[in-house]
Image (tube, coloured by chain):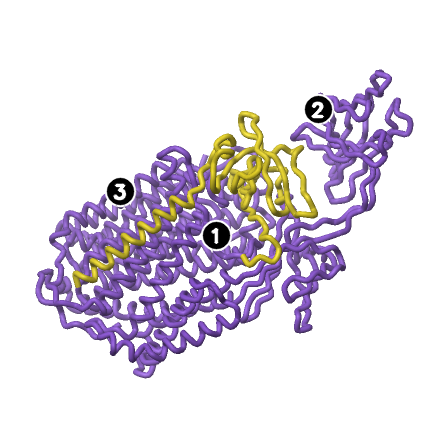
């Protein structure tokens, strides 16, 4: 059973999408009169996808728990913003979100594609139709068989965080907008229009760079402040499969700049646009098909769409590869004027090579379980693999981005470069010496830091130079590189010089770690607005003190223990206090706790205890009281061998009150007492507490334990640079985006003025167009 | 220009080669208990928790427990750290570490618990605590 309006909207989208693609194909074949119809059907496609999304959102907001998707991911008690985010909490919803962005972006694409509209739109539609088909098969509108549940399962508590509300929409916006450069590239191969597409597609590639990057950062920041393992990046498949498309997009953005400025290197971009899109599809396949189920902390479930995902991936990879191979000789390579090796062009190409190689290596690591399964034992790489491989790549990228501002397209002599680089070399050396003085020792750290500072300063000077000329919007790339330098310096320092210690803090006893003294004071009970937290007083060496409140609470819906760290941030570093375990302590107890498994006899110093069965009386619960009465039937066989049956009462309160345990005399054992301590119906076992049964009284004595809190205390020096550098990088990306979007708009307007297909640069291997100097970037 | 491409190709191939070596070195296979006993280097084993066996040593802050595989064979595990939340409810536990002195010394535990979310089980990773004072 399905909620039919939603199903109609999805099938409508599939129908409209296929029709639009077919009509565009006929337009392409010369029926230009059909163009308005093609556009109308595309608008219908967009309208259907938007309608399907609106229907799903309405069902969620209306708490229609008879809809399977609504039931699986939301519940009545969620506040509005979390309720909205349940839209993309599951696979079907996130696929729909992907299509939602795609269908909206499509409205802009047809307006900007102009003479390439028909081929571009055919490919563009194709990139979404596969997903729409999956949605038709795996519908988010499936109904549950009646009766409909009163409440839903709820949203995973870990995802109940503002960052996780906006992370997926930003991520899928990036995924969707990468379809644009891919479609333009395929259309370029198809129609042999080698240059015009770059201007039009570049803003979309930059949009993906910005949105995917922002989504990755949000995910990392969320992990840092919520999960409590002290890091922001775990090299998990889910993280990697968003990082790799981002790296390829970065490569693509550089390649497109290069082609735009030099009017050559066309093959690179055709390959990069295809690879970046394939990376998204491959990542989707890895994380949505269940192939990595045993290897990740994220849960993957196979919805039965693995075959579909493989088919979509294979279709596009084969299509792109075949077209590139087929057209290879037709792609004009510019006549080679000899460019010296030390030129901006070569630096760009090297940078692109490093991005791609790094992306491939990370994919290799992520795919390890798949690859090794082919040859026997499925294996996984340790996270050390990623550290080992990214370090040299980071060094190379920093080095290249440091060289690029003062090397022109036509090449530079080393001595001229040395002159312009001198200041930055001094600055980098100074800062590295400062790091050395502050305790940085590892050679690879110092080298990376030096390169990062060098890159940041070189690019900062380039930004200043541009700004002085009044061309700040042209400085986006340099600006982004300043951010890269700062961010990588932050990553290196906060990673290499983090100090971590696990402390057990007995209540009110100060403990020293590093230069801070921590005292666990009390548990601050939770309220409706605030989760239960632990109050820890932190005194620093300088005499300052503050209170940290790491949260530790039981999720009321799942009974899961949740722990969030407390982070004290300063520009110099964070003090990260992650709670691990809270021990409420217990008074001195007398008794021996014995676990009895149903139907077996456990002998304690000559007396046999057999657990026969238990009966739970839920009648009180039925009346609305939060109480379960459990009657445990035991057979006791004292040393005299006579069996005695005994029924012990145990009352469990679900509202958190102490359970009531009746204590009975053990028949045949003078002074012996038995009571039930815990029952676990799933294991068919009970734990009973025996007193006066053991011959040795010491076995029944347990000293009191003190209330204590275990925490991991981590100092993360300069981690603010990671976030700060990222913001700078994204600000640079924004500048570039604004500039390139204006250019694209101008190109579209020019094309529109001419009312005719753009006179494209003739695809003949003629002499290169006038080489632009560095000021054109 | 050609030269630039050659350098880029050499750089890419060199990096990929380096990546492949690192890949082979850091590969941690899923092994059966018997294989794990013979293996050198980091391995991962999976099994169910023997709920009678787990014990936390407060003095050394170590957790000891036995994993039991489908054939009832046992593998003792030592883990430097606190008993993870939901440890007792785990459907299966993956221990990643080296086999030393008759047991796996786990650097990392993946605890897979039944969850009502997303219709399947959830896994959580736990990393062992750094030895006190060590710069990690």
Determine if residue A9 is in view. Answer: no
A736 or A665, nearer to the observer: A665
Which residue is under mark 2? A598
Q: Eyeballing the image, is A98 above or below A495?
A: above
Rendered hue of chain B is yellow
Q: Residues within 10 Å of mark 1 (few under 14, many from 20)?
A: some
Task: Residue A388: give x, y in percent of width and height.
Answer: 41, 54
Which residue is under mark 1? A234
| Mark earlier in primary sequence (3, 1) | 1
Q: Eyeballing the image, is B35 above or below A483?
A: above
Chain name for mark 1: A
Which secondary structure lies at badge 2? loop
Which secondary structure lies at badge 3? helix
| Mark earlier in primary sequence (3, 2) | 3
Chain name for mark 3: A
**Residue at (34%, 54%) from the top-left corner?**
A358
Marking on residue A315? 3
Of labels 2 and 1, the one closer to you: 1
Q: Are marks 3 and 1 in contact (CB under 8 Å)?
A: no
Marking on residue A560? none
The answer to which image quadrant residue A412 occupies is: bottom left
Q: Are marks 2 and 1 in contact (CB under 8 Å)?
A: no
Determine if residue A651 is in view. Answer: yes
Q: Residues within 10 Å of mark 3 (few under 14, many from 20)?
A: few
Q: Eyeballing the image, is A219 above or below A95?
A: below
Left or right of A236, for residue B109: right
Task: Residue B28: give x, y in percent of width and height.
Answer: 45, 41
Q: Which chain identifier belongs to the purple chain?
A: A
A766 or A739, nearer to the observer: A766
């Amino acid at each position: 059973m399905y909620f039919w309006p939603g199903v109609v909207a999805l099938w409508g989208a599939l129908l409209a999408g296929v029709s639009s693609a077919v009509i565009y194909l006929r337009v392409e074949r010369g029926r230009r009169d059909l163009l308005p119809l093609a556009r109308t059907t595309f608008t219908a496609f967009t309208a259907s996808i938007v309608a399907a999304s609106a229907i799903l959102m309405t069902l969620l907001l209306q708490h229609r728990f008879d809809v399977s998707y609504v039931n699986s991911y939301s519940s009545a008690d969620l506040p509005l913003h979390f309720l909205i985010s349940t839209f993309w909490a599951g696979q079907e919803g996130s696929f729909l979100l992907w299509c939602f962005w795609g269908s909206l972006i499509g409205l802009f694409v047809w307006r900007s594609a102009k003479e390439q509209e028909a081929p571009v739109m055919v490919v563009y539609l194709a990139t979404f139709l596969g997903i729409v088909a999956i949605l038709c098969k795996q519908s988010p509108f499936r109904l549950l068989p009646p009766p409909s549940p009163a409440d839903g399962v709820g949203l995973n508590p870990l995802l109940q965080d503002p960052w996780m509300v906006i992370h997926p929409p930003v991520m899928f916006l990036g995924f969707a907008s990468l379809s644009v450069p891919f479609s333009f590239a395929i259309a370029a191969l198809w129609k042999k229009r080698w240059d015009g597409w770059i201007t039009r597609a570049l803003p979309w590639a930059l949009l993906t760079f910005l949105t995917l990057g922002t989504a990755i950062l949000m995910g990392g920041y969320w992990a840092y402040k919520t999960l409590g393992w002290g890091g922001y990046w775990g090299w998990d498949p889910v993280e990697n499969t968003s990082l790799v498309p981002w790296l390829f997009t970065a490569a693509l953005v550089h390649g497109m700049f290069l082609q735009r400025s030099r009017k050559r290197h066309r093959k690179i971009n055709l390959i990069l646009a295809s690879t970046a899109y394939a990376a998204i599809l491959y990542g989707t396949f890895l994380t949505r098909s269940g192939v990595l189920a045993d290897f990740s902390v994220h849960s993957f479930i196979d919805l039965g769409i693995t075959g579909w995902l493989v088919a979509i991936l294979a279709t596009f990879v084969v299509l792109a590869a075949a077209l590139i191979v087929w057209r290879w000789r037709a792609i004009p390579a510019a006549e080679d004027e000899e460019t010296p090796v030390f030129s901006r062009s070569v630096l760009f190409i090297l940078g692109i090579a490093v991005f791609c190689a790094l992306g491939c290596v990370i994919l290799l690591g992520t795919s390890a379980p798949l690859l090794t399964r082919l040859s026997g034992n499925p294996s996984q790489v340790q996270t050390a693999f990623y550290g080992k491989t990214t370090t040299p790549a980071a060094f190379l990228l920093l080095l290249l981005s440091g060289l690029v501002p003062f090397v022109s397209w036509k090449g530079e002599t080393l001595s001229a470069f040395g002159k312009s680089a001198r200041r930055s070399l001094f600055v980098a050396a100074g800062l590295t010496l400062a790091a050395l003085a502050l305790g940085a020792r590892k050679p690879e750290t110092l080298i990376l830091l030096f390169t990062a500072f060098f890159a940041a300063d070189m690019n900062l000077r380039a930004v200043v130079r541009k700004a002085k000329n009044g061309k700040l919007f042209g400085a986006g790339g340099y600006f982004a590189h300043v951010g890269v330098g700062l961010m990588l310096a932050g990553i290196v320092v906060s990673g290499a010089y983090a100090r971590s210690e696990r402390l057990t803090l007995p209540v009110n006893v100060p403990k020293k770690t590093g230069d801070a003294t921590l005292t666990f004071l009390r548990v601050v009970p939770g309220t409706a607005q605030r989760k239960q937290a632990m109050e820890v007083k932190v005194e620093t060496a300088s005499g300052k003190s503050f209170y940290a409140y790491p949260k530790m609470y039981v999720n009321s819906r799942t009974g899961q223990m949740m722990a969030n760290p407390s982070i004290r941030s300063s520009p110099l570093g964070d003090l990260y206090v992650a709670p691990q375990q809270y021990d409420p302590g217990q008074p001195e107890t007398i008794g021996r706790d014995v676990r009895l498994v149903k139907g077996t006899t456990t002998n304690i110093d000559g007396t046999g205890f057999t657990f026969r069965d238990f009966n739970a009386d839920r009648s009180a619960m039925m009346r609305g009281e939060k109480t379960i009465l459990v009657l445990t039937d035991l057979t006791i066989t004292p040393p005299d061998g006579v069996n005695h049956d005994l029924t012990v009462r145990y009352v469990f309160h679900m509202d958190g009150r102490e359970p009531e345990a009746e204590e009975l005399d053990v028949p045949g054992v003078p002074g012996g007492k038995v009571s039930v301590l815990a029952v676990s119906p799933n294991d068919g076992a009970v734990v009973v507490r025996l007193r006066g049964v053991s011959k040795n009284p010491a076995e029944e004595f347990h000293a009191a334990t003190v209330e204590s809190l275990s925490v991991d205390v981590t100092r993360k020096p300069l981690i603010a640079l990671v976030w700060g550098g990222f913001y700078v990088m994204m600000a640079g990306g924004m500048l570039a985006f604004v500039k390139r979007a204006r250019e694209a708009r101008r190109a579209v307007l020019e094309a529109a003025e001419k009312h005719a297909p753009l006179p494209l640069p003739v695809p003949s291997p003629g002499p290169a167009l006038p080489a632009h100097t560095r000021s054109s970037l | 220009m050609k030269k630039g491409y050659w350098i880029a190709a050499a750089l890419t191939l060199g990096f990929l080669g380096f990546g492949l070596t690192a890949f082979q070195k850091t590969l941690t296979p899923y092994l059966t208990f018997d294989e794990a006993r013979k293996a050198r280097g980091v391995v991962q084993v999976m099994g169910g928790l023997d709920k009678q066996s787990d014990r936390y040593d407060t003095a050394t802050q170590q957790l000891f427990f036995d994993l039991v595989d489908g054939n009832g064979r046992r593998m003792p595990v030592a883990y430097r750290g606190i008993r993870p939340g939901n440890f007792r409810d785990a459907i299966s536990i993956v221990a990643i570490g080296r086999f030393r002195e008759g047991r796996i010394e786990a650097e990392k535990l993946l605890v897979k618990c039944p969850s009502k979310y997303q219709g399947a089980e959830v896994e959580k990773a736990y990393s062992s605590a750094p030895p006190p004072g060590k710069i990690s």
